[in-house]
Amino acid sequence: IFRLIDSNKDGSVTLEEFTTGLLTMKGPAKAIDVKGIVYDVKKEAQKTKRRMKRIDARLRDIKSQIAGHVNGDVDG
């Protein structure tokens, strides 16, 4: 919650940011708020999926290199 109300994103929350942040969160979520959150979550999920694919490819490469060293197939 503190990250949400840290309006200037400096890693700390002033009293003004805290009170303003809490006041803006008061009441039920509006449809536009929910849509915005859903959009952000989907966007982050796509980024995470891309990162995971890169990590997986890198791990396969490392595994192959290790297998090469174990089997004595070392280049260089």
Image: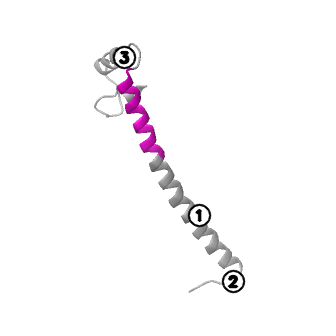
Label whose residue precedes the other's in the sequence (3 or 2): 3
Query: What residue sits right under mark 2 in the picture?
Result: 72
The amino acid at mark 1 is Leu
Res. 27 image quadrant: top left
**Which residue is at 66% across, 84% downward?**
73
CB of mark 3 within 8 Å of CB of mark 1? no
Question: In the rendered image of this protein, does residue 65 appear above or below residue 16?
Answer: below
| Dominant SS type (magenta) | helix
Res. 43 image quadrant: top left
Q: Element type at marker 1?
A: helix
Label whose residue precedes the other's in the sequence (2 or 1): 1
Label whose residue precedes the other's in the sequence (3 or 1): 3
Query: What residue sits right under mark 3 in the picture?
Result: 22
Query: What residue sits right under mark 1 in the picture?
Result: 59
Q: What separation in Å lies between label 3 and label 1 (alpha carbons)?
A: 44 Å
The magenta segment: 30-45
The amino acid at mark 2 is Gly
- Give coordinates of residue 12: x percent, y percent: 35, 29
